[in-house]
Image (cartoon, grey):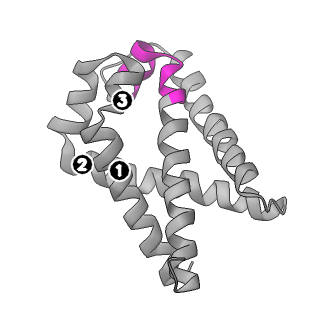
Amino acid sequence: MNKNCIVSFIYAYSFTMVFLVYILKLPTLVTGNTKLVEEYYAKNFNYTFVLDFFLFLVYLSISLFVIDYFGINTFFNKILMVAFVTTLISGAFFLYFMNIKKTNSFFSRWFHTVSYKAIIYDILLLTFTFVLYQYLYNISTSKTLG
């Protein structure tokens, strides 16, 4: 991973979090659960901002690996692959947490409460981040805005 990749990811992640999560309040709009959203994004801001950074990095790294492995070249198909990989990963977590007894851990409460909406929310966040990342990466490697 080169410097342009890392910087593009940091900007894309940061913008996604500020714009979608804190300004548009997307997690509440998608899940309808204000209490859990405030617990995760407001009360535990310092912890969750860093945790999500690494989770996004893992999700997008796996997505980029799959995109490269299958030689996907069109932007639209890349977006679809990010959505698909996100669905698989979040879906696996969803199935795991839904098949065990609800506990006090945040993610157990999250999946048991918002159900499949957690997957939809992750797809929206990750695909938006990918679109920004790809745009910023393309700008950084072309050295031109036009």
Residue drawn at point x = 33 percent, y = 57 percent: 14
Quadrant, the N terminus:
bottom right
* Relative to 74, 30 lies left or right: left
Q: In the rendered structure, which amino acid carries the disc numbered 3?
A: Pro
Looking at the image, which residue sits at the far left? 43
Q: Callout 3: helix, strand or loop? A: helix
Q: Secondary structure at mark 1?
A: helix
* Residue at the spot 20% in from the left edge and 45% down from the top edge: 45
Q: Amino acid at mark 1?
A: Leu
Looking at the image, residue 119 lies above or below residue 42:
above
Q: Nearer the viewer, mark 1 or mark 3?
A: 3
Distance CA(mark 2)–CA(mark 3): 17 Å
Label 2: state its secondary structure: helix
| Residue in the picture at 47% in, 42% down | 125
Q: Which residue is mark 1?
A: 51
Marks 2/1: CA–CA distance: 6 Å
Q: Residue type at mark 2: give it.
A: Tyr
Q: Which mark is residue 27?
A: 3
User: What are the residue bounds of the magenta stretch?
Assistant: 107-120
Q: Where 67 sits versus 104, above or below? A: below
x and y percent of residue 144 in the render? 52, 83
Q: What residue does disc 2 label?
A: 47
Instruction: For label 2, count other residues whose C-alpha is less than 10 Å away and answer few (under 14), some (14-19) or many (20+).
Output: few
Extreme residue toward the front, this view: 146
User: How many C-alpha atoms fall within 10 Å of the one at disc 1: few (<14), some, or many (≥20)?
Assistant: few
Work out which quarter of the rendered image holds the C terminus and state it: bottom right
Q: Residue furthest right?
A: 70
Assess whether residue 96 is covered by the magenta stretch: no
Task: Give whichever of discs 1 and 3 has the lower sequence position.
Answer: 3
64 lies above or below 32: below
